[in-house]
Amino acid sequence: MLAENLVHFSRILRDAGLAVGPDRVLAAIAAVEAVGLDRREDVRAALSAVMLERHEQQTLFDAAFDAFFRDPKLLEQMMYLLLPKVQGRGEKTQPPRANRLAEALAAPAPKRDAPPENQAAQDEIRFETEFSFSERERLAQADFESMSTAEYEMAKKLAEQAPLPMLPVRRRRHEASARGGTLDLRRTLHGMARAPHTLTPAFTRPRSELPPLVVLIDISGSMERYSRLFLHYVHGLTRRHLKVHTFVFGTRLTNITRCLRQRDPDVALKMADALVHDWKGGTRIAASLDEFNRRWARRVLGGNAALLLVSDGLERDDGGALERAAAQLHRLAHQLVWLNPLLRFAGFEPRAEGIRTLLAHVDRFLPVHNLASLADLAQALRRPALNPSTLLH
C-alpha cells in the first residue's frame, strides 16, 4: 500500500536524523496522490517539498530516496506491494551515503543482556581499546555532518579534551621569579635586613595569564550539528579555564555560561537546552550581535579578551545593520576570530552578502568542521594574522 511504504520511508528518514512526524507523513501521502506515480522525479520533488524543513537536508533525503526506491519498478507497484524493496535487482553504482543513513538502513543490532554493574567503566575501557590510532586519524578528518551517531558521540568526548586556543598574555604586574629576571630591590633589601651577613638577590618577572575568552555560537538550523559539538568543546574549555563566557544565538541571544560550568557535559547541555528556546530555528545575526554589544560587551570583553564567532554567516545585511554591529564588535574585542564550517569546501568563495560584510571586520577567518580543525585552532591563533578582507577580492 502507498501509505505503508511512505510510513516505512519516513521511519528511515527519522532514524537518519530528520524530524519527520506523522503530520509530514500525511502530507506526503496527499502530495504523492496529487502528483501521481507516473514519474519518479515528480514523486521525489513532492516528498522533499513536504518532508524537509531545511535546504541542507536535501542531500541526505536524495540518498535515502535513491536507496529506498532503487528498483525502477517499485513506484509502479507501490499501490499493491506491502513492503518496499530496499535492494534493487542490479548492482548499479549509487552515490555515497552519509553514515547516519547507512545506520538507518542497516538491520537493527541484536539486543544485549543487562548492562554490567560498572557500565561507565566498561564504556571507558571499550572507548580506549576499540578507538585505535588509525580510527582516531580518520575521525579527526571526518566532517561533523557526515559522522555516524557512534562517531559523533566519540567526537564529543575528544572535543572535550582539545587544547586551549588562547595564548598567555603578558601583564604589567610582576611576580616572584626563582630563575632570574628583573632584580627586585625591595625584596632583596628586606632579605638583607633579616640576615645582614648574606646577600641573596630576589628577582621578578612579568606575570602572564590566559586572557578571557568569549564565544558566540550560531545555533540556527544550518549550524545545528556543528554548534552542538562545538558546545562540548567549549564545555571542556570552561572546565579548565574559568574565564570563558558562552553565548548562543538564533533568533535571540542567550547567555549559557553558568550552564556550561556544570562538571558533567550531559547535565550542562541539558540545562542549556532548557534555557535556550530557539534551537534549529532561523538566524538573526545582526540583531544578536547588536544585543551583545549593548548588554554584554563591556562586561566580558575586558582584559584583552578574544572573541570566537562560530557561524556560517548566511544572512542578508538589510539596511546595514550587520555592518554596524560587526564594526562595533571588532572595536570592542581584542581579537575577533570567525570560525566558519563553510570553509571545509575547497572552492569556497564569499559570495553571500552576510559573509562579505562580516569578513571586513574580523581578524582571523578559520574553518571549524572536524576534530582536526579544533585541535589546530591553538596553533592557528599563534601564526601571524592575515587580513580576511583579502578574500573579498
Image (cartoon, rainbow, N blue to C red):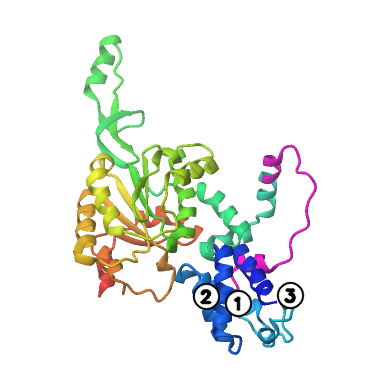
Identity of the amino acid at label 3? Answer: Leu
* Residue annotated with mark 2: 48
Q: Residues within 10 Å of mark 2 (few under 14, many from 20)?
A: many
Numbered disc 3: secondary structure: loop
The residue at 36%/31% (across/down) is 179
229 or 375, nearer to the observer? 229
C-alpha gap between disc 2 and disc 3: 21 Å
Identity of the amino acid at label 1? Answer: Phe
Q: Specify the segment rendered in magenta.
A: 95-123
Please state if 57 lies on the left or on the right of 77 as rendered: left
The residue at 56%/75% (across/down) is 30
Q: Nearer the viewer, mark 1 or mark 2?
A: 2
Q: Earlier in the sequence, mark 1 or mark 3?
A: 1
Rendered location of residue 250, percent (x, y): 37, 56
Quarter of the image for the N terminus: give it: bottom right
Please state if 274 lies on the left or on the right of 350 as rendered: right
- Numbered badge on residue 65: 1
* Residue annotated with mark 3: 83
Callouts 1 and 2 close, C-beta under 8 Å: yes
Rendered location of residue 221, percent (x, y): 44, 61
Asked if residue 164 shows in the view, the reply is yes
Asked if residue 196 shows in the view, the reply is no
289 or 238, nearer to the observer? 289
Tell me, yes or no, whether the highlighted magenta stretch contains residue 82: no
- Numbered badge on residue 86: none
C-alpha gap between disc 1 and disc 3: 15 Å
The residue at 54%/39% (across/down) is 264
Numbered disc 1: secondary structure: helix
294 or 208, nearer to the observer? 294
C-alpha gap between disc 1 and disc 2: 9 Å
Q: Earlier in the sequence, mark 2 or mark 3?
A: 2
